[in-house]
Amino acid sequence: GATLMACPEAVMNQEARYLKALEGAERFTQEGTTLLVHAKGMDRPLRFFRREG
């Protein structure tokens, strides 16, 4: 689970939606160096970009 910290409610809600999307992942695809996570109940996938460093 996630660690609960004292954050503004909007930030905590955003984190909860993000974690729910990850838990609902149904499939993963790749577009170049971008990972797409397709989650149940979401109209668009989460997009993760590779960062050079």
Image: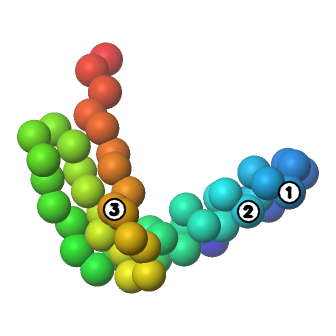
Circle 1 — which element? helix
- Per the model, the C-alpha gap separating discs 2 and 1 is 6 Å
Identify the residue shown where x is 26% and y is 34%.
50
Position of residue 47 relative to residue 18, above or below, is above
Q: Give the residue at mark 1.
A: 9
* Number of residues whose C-alpha sits closer than 10 Å to that of mark 2, classed few (under 14), some (14–19) or many (20 or more): few
Position of residue 7 relative to residue 20, above or below, is above
Q: Nearer the viewer, residue 44 or 14?
A: 44
Whether pointer 2 and pointer 1 mark residues with C-beta atoms closer than 8 Å, the reply is yes
**Can residue 52 be seen in this snapshot?**
yes
Q: Is residue 21 left or right of residue 36?
A: right
Question: In the orientation shown, which residue stands out farthest toward the top?
Answer: 53
Q: In this view, does 14 lie to the left or right of 33?
A: right
Q: Residue 13 carries which label?
A: 2
Q: Where is residue 11 in the image (x, y as percent from the top left)?
A: 75, 51
Q: Where is residue 3 in the image (x, y as percent from the top left)?
A: 72, 60
Task: Give the amino acid type for the residue marked by disc 2 in the picture.
Answer: Asn
Residue 38 image-quadrant placement: bottom left
